[in-house]
Image (spheres, rainbow, N blue to C red):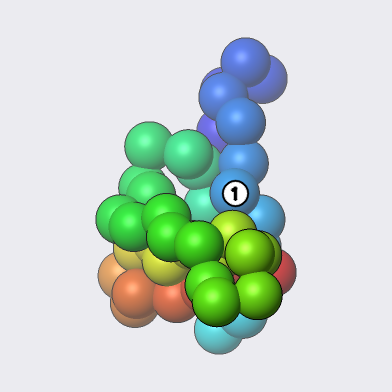
Amino acid sequence: MNADESSLGRCPDCGEQIPEAWLLIEYETDESETEIWAECPTCEDVVAPE
C-alpha cells in the first residue's frame, strides 16, 4: 500500500489493510453511527473493516 493512501481498516477474514479505494458503501445507522462495507483486495470478500 502506498504511504499516502488511507486505510479503511483491516479485513476481519485475512487481516490485510483495506485501502479507501475499495470502499463499496458508507451509511448512517439509526443510532447515528457510520458503518462501511468494502471489498478486500486480498481475499476478495465484501467485509466490514475492523
**Total number of numbered labels?**
1
Quadrant of image for the C terminus = bottom right
Q: Residue furthest top?
A: 4
Residue at the (66%, 20%) spot, across then down: 3
Residue at the (62%, 15%) spot, across then down: 4
Q: Residue furthest bottom?
A: 13
Residue 50 visible in rendering: yes
Query: Within 10 Å of the Cα at label 1, are there few (<14), some (14-19), or many (20+) other Cα atoms?
Result: some
- Image check: 21 left or right of 16? left
Residue 22: give x, y in percent of width and height. Answer: 36, 47
* Above or below for 50 versus 18: below
Residue at the (55%, 77%) spot, across then down: 30
- Image check: 5 left or right of 25? right
Q: Quadrant of residue 43?
A: bottom left
* Above or below for 10 versus 22: below
Circle 1 SS class: strand
Residue 40 visible in rendering: no
* Above or below for 25 versus 31: above
Q: Quadrant of residue 21?
A: top left
Residue 12: give x, y in percent of width and height. Answer: 61, 80
- Image check: 20 left or right of 12? left
Residue at the (63%, 64%) spot, across then down: 32
**Which residue position is annotated with label 1?**
8
Quadrant of image for the N terminus = top right
Q: Amino acid at mark 1?
A: Leu
